[in-house]
């Protein structure tokens, strides 16, 4: 039989993406139209606008993915689409040649999940966020710090802007309260950090009024300290999850992999911190390239291929294991 090809279409949030992937797991063509700049200009994603833009750009994006693959729509065997609207359902499976089981940390604008992936449709959730996602906390904080007003940051997402400004700051300048320090599980929480940042900004602004000094150096310190605490929290929970899997023999001794995905996975500070955690527990860190870390058509087509191969149209099976104990 010939090799099946799947067209994937992604429109779950603010990117219109399409890709053609075949059963041999080759990406034959891909195209993306990002609405990011428009949403940055509006200070957030407005769903009816996003929908209109998807409607407008989808035909051209699909055409361009198909023509990159030298195909027309009648050549594809199946079409995979993101089935649920909104930011909270696009589960991202994007690593290309993975062996099961592996550990995945999904950190985006809509999610924060640590899970053991047992198979194409089988996940055990080790922990997830109790409140905000890290991307949400970064975006809202960047907005509150008015980072868009700084010319060199005006085109960046909140997370990118904070990462960039943090490079000039001192991560130990502000002592953020460490989230869930005593919680013996792998859940996450970011709202306390966000709140602390808001309080600090207010205090700095008051001071600025009195002394009339420039806020930028303090903003850089604040960004560095905030980023440091957010990423340290992520690492601490991953570390705990790895320890738990070890204790319960849920991860083979060899060929251990941690996949980090979602928009926040592009953060270099996070990547290098996770690299250290992985070294300690003998995991290989796999960070898909940034273009595959955010919403895109390839992940949807890929998921379509995996389901095509095992011939299923069933939904994912989720269970959760609560890492209790030490
Ligand atoms: O996965 P994604 O593209 O979309 C949704 O979740 O909808 O993730 C977007 C998020 C945004 O919150 C953005 O601020 C964050 O990823 N992000 C980053 C970086 N680049 C994007 N956060 C931290 N560091 C970055 N370099």
Image: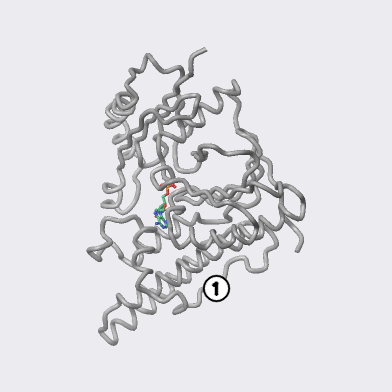
* Relative depth, front residue between 324 and 42: 324
Percent position of residue 296, x then y: 40, 38
Q: Is residue 249 above or below residue 296?
A: below
On whether ligand 1 comes within 8 Å of the CB at mark 1, the answer is no
Percent position of residue 239, x then y: 63, 60
* Relative depth, front residue between 80 and 285: 285
How was this image coloured?
Answer: one colour
Q: Is residue 73 above or below residue 304?
A: above
Residue that appears at 49% across and 48% down: 261
Q: Is residue 236 left or right of residue 253?
A: left
* Relative depth, front residue between 250 and 127: 250
* The furthest residue to the bottom: 211
Q: In which quadrant of the rendered view does residue 156 lie?
A: bottom left
* The furthest residue to the front: 254
Q: Is residue 249 above or below residue 193?
A: above
Residue that appears at 56% across and 26% down: 307
Percent position of residue 237, x then y: 61, 60
Disc 1 designates what residue?
Answer: 177
Percent position of residue 174, x then y: 46, 78
Q: Is residue 80 left or right of residue 323?
A: left
Q: How many marks?
A: 1
Q: In which quadrant of the rendered view does residue 244 lie?
A: bottom right
Crowdedness near tag 1: few (<14), some (14–19) or many (≥20) residues, C-alpha within 10 Å: few
Q: Is residue 177 left or right of residue 137?
A: right
Give the quadrant of the C terminus: bottom right
Residue that appears at 51% across and 73% down: 176
Residue that appears at 35% across and 77% down: 218
Q: Secondary structure at mark 1?
A: loop
């Amino acid at each position: 039989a010939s090799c099946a090809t799947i067209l994937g279409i992604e429109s779950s949030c603010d990117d219109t993406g399409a890709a053609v992937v075949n059963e041999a797991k080759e990406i034959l063509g891909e195209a993306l139209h990002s609405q990011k700049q428009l949403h940055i200009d509006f200070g957030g994603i407005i769903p009816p606008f996003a929908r209109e833009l998807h409607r407008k750009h989808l035909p051209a994006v699909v055409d361009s993915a198909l023509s990159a693959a030298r195909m027309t729509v009648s050549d594809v065997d199946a079409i995979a689409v993101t089935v649920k609207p909104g930011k909270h359902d696009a589960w991202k499976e994007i690593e290309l040649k993975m062996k099961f089981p592996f550990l995945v940390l999904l950190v985006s604008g809509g999610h924060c999940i640590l899970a053991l992936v047992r198979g194409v449709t089988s996940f055990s959730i080790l922990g997830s966020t109790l409140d905000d996602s890290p991307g949400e906390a970064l975006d809202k904080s960047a907005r509150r710090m008015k980072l868009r007003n700084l010319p060199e940051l005006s085109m960046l997402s909140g997370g990118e802007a904070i990462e960039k400004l943090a490079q000039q700051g001192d991560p130990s300048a502000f002592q953020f309260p460490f989230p869930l320090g005593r919680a013996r599980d792998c859940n996450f929480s970011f709202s306390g950090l966000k709140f602390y940042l808001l309080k600090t900004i207010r205090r700095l602004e008051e001071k600025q009024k009195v002394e009339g000094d420039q806020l930028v150096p303090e903003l850089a310190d604040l960004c560095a300290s905030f980023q440091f605490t957010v990423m340290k929290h992520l690492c601490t929970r991953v570390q705990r999850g790895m320890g738990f899997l070890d204790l319960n023999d849920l991860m083979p001794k060899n060929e251990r992999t941690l996949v980090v995905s979602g928009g926040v996975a592009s953060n270099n500070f996070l990547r290098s911190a996770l690299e250290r955690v992985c070294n300690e527990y003998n995991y290989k860190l796999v960070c898909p390239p940034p273009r595959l870390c955010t919403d895109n058509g390839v992940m949807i087509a890929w998921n379509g291929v995996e389901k095509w191969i095992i011939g299923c149209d069933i939904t994912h099976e989720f269970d959760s294991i609560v890492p209790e104990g030490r």
